[in-house]
């Protein structure tokens, strides 16, 4: 039996999953990732901790599955996007911390570019808005602030890349030598240095952000054999056959392969993607256009995307910051102990607001509290905030689609850790007014990476066969009137306006 290994390197944890040829999980190993917040608005990870944890979980998953690396047909990688690493090609040592997608230290620089009128052409080339969220300004900051980084980069001594690049380099690096320096189209399209129409690094963008082209990886398809892991790492040289940003991997894993199909992932943030086929649809509503996962030899595919910065991270704040729950799973029972939030509205703009608002300067707020407000009301408002941010994305996406003659969203497939919360999923269906579909296997990000790898090595003949394991667990139907939903969304928008008002 051929097994497939998926490396799922996320913002809060590093995991390895092993799937059998039917798409069932046979093993999973996970290690929490340390979060570093050296200054307000700064978020960092240790690249070497990421690699050490990834390798450790690979070995643990193999042991748990009772198999060896010789039983693996391929390795697929799904990763947190936009987070970027700068390292020495000779030693393999990172020059400093990885700057995480949540990091806001380049806010002033991005604002200055916007003030110069640079945003529109950048959006046309990349599908992205000018924001610290993306990798380009982070790479520039590293080159400007890490000792001798810029002069060394110009001499070709350094490499930069998103987490997929860092993992492939580490997996393929011979002792004392170099590794493969590659990235896939889906990750490249999140850097703000990649032209999503030409499929290559954009010289004008490289000049604007002052990033040498020699610093960047070669861009490959998401489903393509790029090399083999070093046999000494896990016991055999296994093909590395897929790389995809976690959200594009989840879109594929959810079976959203054609125009109009959409999924939302509830992780640290929330990420709503709608496949638009081979059409790169520009948004007028603050959404992003991004490259979807691409098989080798196939045409470019695109998606509309909306990103919420604080999804599950809001629950983590209730646990670690306010300490009103001991574990993340405690929020469900606490929030369900009240019928509603009692007029409390939480705007969790701890790292600014993402789509469709794009307000990096916004700060979080809890509004509408009275003497009768309890921890339960705040917990309920936190769940509401996750669903309300997603509802704002769906409304924006529907406007974009309707403007081009398309049809609004008729259902939404969900995944990610927080989708296991029944109350959150019911609130989401109520606000959207469409069914919310949760699959039996919610590990669709890793499943998408494994399926893309399986396609590249011929385990499956086509994408439909690879995704045949998708099965429905529960369909959440709307249970409130559209008037009630609209009233709740209006209260949310009022709260957002208060946060955005200086």
Image: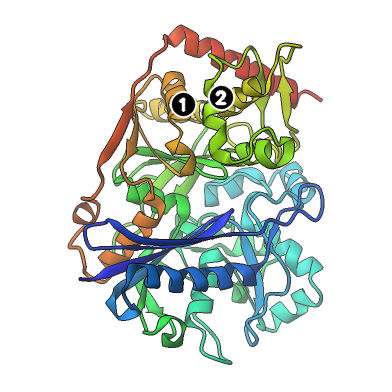
**Would you identify the image quadrant in which residue 71 lies?**
bottom left
The residue at 74%/20% (across/down) is 498
Outermost residue toward the bottom in this view: 176
Residue 420 seen by the camera: yes
**Would you identify the image quadrant in which residue 313 lies?**
top right
Quadrant where the C terminus is found in the figure: top right
Secondary element type, mark 1:
helix
Secondary element type, mark 2:
helix
What number is the disc on residue 423? 1
The residue at 69%/34% (across/down) is 349
Q: Position of residue 185 (x, y in %)?
A: 44, 61
What number is the disc on residue 335? 2
Q: Is residue 173 left or right of residue 117?
A: left
Q: Position of residue 384 (x, y in %)?
A: 56, 24
| Upstream in sequence: badge 1 or badge 2 | 2
Residue 286 seen by the camera: no
Q: Position of residue 192 (x, y in %)?
A: 59, 55
Q: How many marks?
A: 2
């Amino acid at each position: 039996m051929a097994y497939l290994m998926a490396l799922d390197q996320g913002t809060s944890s590093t995991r390895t999953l092993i799937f059998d040829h039917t798409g069932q999980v046979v093993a999973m190993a996970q290690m929490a990732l340390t979060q570093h917040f050296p200054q307000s608005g700064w978020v960092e990870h240790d690249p070497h901790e990421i690699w050490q944890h990834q390798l450790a979980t690979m070995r643990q998953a193999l042991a748990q599955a009772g198999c060896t690396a010789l039983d693996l047909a391929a390795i697929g990688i799904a990763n947190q996007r936009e987070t970027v690493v700068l390292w020495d090609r000779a030693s393999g040592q990172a020059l400093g911390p990885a700057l995480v997608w949540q990091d806001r230290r380049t806010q002033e620089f991005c604002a200055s570019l916007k003030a110069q009128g640079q945003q529109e052409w950048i959006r046309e080339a990349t599908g992205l808005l000018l924001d610290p969220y993306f990798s380009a300004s982070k790479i520039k900051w590293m080159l400007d602030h890490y000792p001798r980084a810029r002069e060394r980069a110009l001499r070709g001594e350094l490499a930069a890349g998103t987490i997929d690049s860092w993992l492939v380099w580490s997996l393929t690096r011979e002792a004392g030598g170099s590794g493969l320096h590659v990235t896939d189209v889906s990750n490249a399209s999140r850097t703000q240095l990649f032209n999503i129409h030409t499929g290559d690094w954009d010289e004008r963008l490289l000049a604007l952000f002052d990033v040498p082209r020699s610093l960047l990886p070669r861009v490959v398809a998401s489903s393509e054999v790029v090399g083999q892991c070093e046999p000494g790492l896990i016991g055999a040289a296994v093909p590395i056959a897929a790389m995809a940003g976690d959200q594009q991997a989840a879109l594929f894993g959810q079976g959203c392969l054609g125009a109009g199909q959409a999924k939302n992932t509830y992780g640290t943030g929330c990420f709503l993607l709608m496949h638009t086929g081979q059409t790169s649809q520009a948004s007028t509503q603050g959404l992003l256009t991004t490259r979807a996962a691409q098989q080798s030899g196939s045409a470019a595919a695109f998606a509309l995307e909306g990103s919420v910065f604080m999804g599950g991270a809001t629950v983590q704040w209730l646990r670690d910051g306010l300490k009103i729950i001991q574990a993340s799973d405690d929020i469900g029972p606490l929030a369900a102990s009240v019928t509603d939030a009692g007029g409390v509205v939480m705007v969790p703009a701890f790292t600014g607001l993402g789509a469709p608002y794009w307000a990096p300067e916004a700060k979080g707020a809890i509004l509408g509290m009275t003497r009768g407000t309890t921890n339960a009301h705040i917990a309920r408002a936190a769940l509401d905030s996750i669903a309300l941010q997603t509802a704002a994305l769906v409304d924006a996406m529907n406007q974009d689609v309707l403007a081009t003659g398309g049809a609004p969203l008729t259902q939404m497939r969900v995944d990610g850790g927080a989708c296991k919360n029944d109350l959150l999923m019911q609130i989401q269906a109520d606000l959207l007014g469409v069914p919310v579909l949760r699959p039996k296997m919610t590990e669709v990000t890793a499943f998408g990476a494994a399926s893309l790898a399986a396609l590249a090595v011929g385990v499956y003949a086509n994408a439909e066969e690879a995704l045949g394991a998708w099965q429905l667990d529960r369909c959440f139907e709307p249970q409130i009137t559209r008037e009630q939903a609209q009233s709740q969304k209006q209260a949310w928008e009022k709260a957002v306006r208060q946060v955005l008002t200086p």
